[in-house]
Image (cartoon, helix red, strand yellow):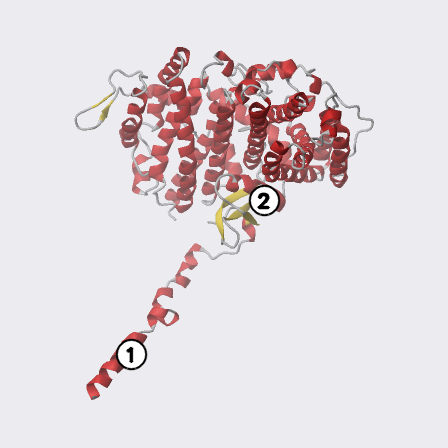
Amino acid sequence: MMNNDSLDPRVNRLHLSDAAAPVIVNDGENWNIYEVFHQEKRGAHHEHVGCVHAPSPQLALVFAKEQFGRRKKCVNIWVVRSADIPAFEVEDEDMFANNADKTYRDASGFKVMEKINKYKAQQRGEK
Amino acid sequence: MQAAITYLLTKMADDALILGHRNSEWTGLGPIMEEDIAFSSMAQDKIGHALGLYSILHEQYGTPDPDKYAFLREEKDFRCCHLVELPNRAYDFSLMRHFLFDHADALRYEYMAQSSLESLRPFAKKLKGEIKYHTLHANAWLTQLSRAGEDSYGRMQAALDECLPLALGMFEQSSFDTELMEAGIYPGEEKMQAAWLERIYPLLVKCALNMPVPAEPVNGGRHGFHTEHLGPLLDEMGAVFRLDPAANW
Amino acid sequence: MPVDYRRQLIRLIEQHAHSEVMGALPEGTWITRAPGFKRKLALIAKVQDEVGHGQLLYNAAETLGKRREAMINDLLSGKSKYSNVFNYPAETWADVTVIGFLIDAAAIVNQVANAKGSYGPYCRALDRICYEESFHLKQGHDAFIELATGTNMQRQMLQEALNRWWQPIMHFFGPPDKTSVHGEKLMQWKVKMASNDDMRNQFPDAYVPKIWELGMTLPDAALQKNEAGRWQYTDPDWNLFFKVINGEGPCNAERMKVRKWAEESGRWVRTALMSHTAADMLPVA
């Protein structure tokens, strides 16, 4: 049994090196990143809740289940590699800018009652 | 019959408590954060299973309350197998132990869900999903690490060689077995071991891992004979509780 | 996004993530000895959450372009800091209850404020973290009360732990505003939403009465609320604070050794399953 003079008996069982010993984690050692979507009940949307680092889709699901499904209600999880999600660039946001102006796509752009009321008022005037 | 049931539930609970305790030693120190979280959840589950069984024992079979039963009992009265007692060492050992144990655990609870002992059935059914996740997790790791190059494969094979004889000790028989079998409470360890081998064998084949032959079971735990590691573990686990067992903590 | 804003955000979020990961160590000290099932389960779940928080925060920082491996390396080399408070030892079980109650309470003061900040991914991580911290605080308070209302031995244990932790808690909110290097800029950018001194004042208001009502004391004779409603206290020893930041705290070396052990012992697992196409990946935001 080791003894590192720690107050933690778990730590006293480890073979520790010097605190100054260099330890470097290589690029890629934390694997791929998967985006995680959870579903609160069957039939509901899967909503984005965060990501996990995993070496495969299978382990991504295993990890996501505990990191994002261990407390609140959750019935299913999707994972997808971040790199497989195509998205627009931030500077392309201007393509969406005029959406709100295009009222012909919106119910509010058609003033049906106004026209009916105008017609009715006209009819009354003629009588 | 009371003694036989107490023996059965105590051995299951002791296995779960000691393995959960060992696995919780990885919390905060795991190989990567995501796995740290997953493994920690399963350690909690195991300790929770022990608590559930100790509670049934306390309420229906007159053992002391779960805290006292777990934190004050003497080593010789523990019924856990040697597999769960060994210190953690490297992650390969912990994963292999988890794989071998959890498949046996899954089977035990599957039988419990149909046991003639009514008080056990709802408890066993409640744990079904939890244990399903444990075996899913174990299978995923085992298949991936066994196929991830020579070093990793070698580690998993060495871990299997070391763990299998210990794992066979899970099925150590006792004089209570016949009584439990005849009452339809538990199918007996011989049958359990056969079912377990049938379940893990195809998975090991998928991993190209070889069963060590011959593997003699490491027995003793079910009769109160333990490794030199259990005593210190129990002393550590009870260190604060035993400062004043009458106090509330 | 302005370069400096991005850089400061990464620095702040990364330090927060490191603090969660290192914070798992002092409390982990008592995982194998927690007294009774309820405490044992709650402590494992709590330390697990700290790791989970680290995971969420590293992800938030990664959306700004720095990979998790690089952040871990900066932690291990000492280039990037973590909260000083985790360089103190948890000497007894009572220390765990004080950490769970008061350090988590202090963290909530800080995190609730920052959750209203300007960077969405960080705020989302903080929302989830605050939700879980409220469990930490509650379980810590519960274990704290159990000792405070327990036997003489338990009360003494708790009092000694309070005496040990009071100064590190006052340090927790960071150096005084007048000496804080990054504070003003971070507040201007709405990254940091409350100043160090404001938070240090807010904390006693909520928690000192909860300590006093149980007949426990705090090791500062000057501690009291003045007529204007501001708390007065003895200024903590800031020289000590800077000494601990620079590596001279009682547990700096041990924490680093243990963290390095964890990275080294897990390396074979990570390397075995490493993909050679992973190197340039970042999460989407």
For disc 2, the chain is A
Q: Earlier in the sequence, mark 1 or mark 2?
A: 2
Which residue in the structure is indicated by mark 2? Answer: A61
Percent x, y of residue B234? 59, 16
Q: Is residue C88 shown left or right of residue B112?
A: left
Quarter of the image where one finds residue B249: top left
Quarter of the image where one finds residue B53: top right
Percent x, y of residue A86? 52, 56
Q: Residue at (38%, 22%) from the top-left corner?
A: C145
- Outermost residue to the right: B214
The amino acid type, in three-letter code, at marker 1 is: Ile
> Residue B57: which disc?
none
Q: CA distance from mark 1 to mark 2?
A: 57 Å
**Label 2 CA crowd tier, 10 Å (few <14, some 14–19, many 20+):** many
Which residue in the structure is indicated by mark 1? Answer: A116
Do circles 1 and 2 both sit on a common chain?
Answer: yes
| Secondary element at tag 1 | helix
Q: Is residue B183 shown left or right of residue C202?
A: right
Numbered label tally:
2
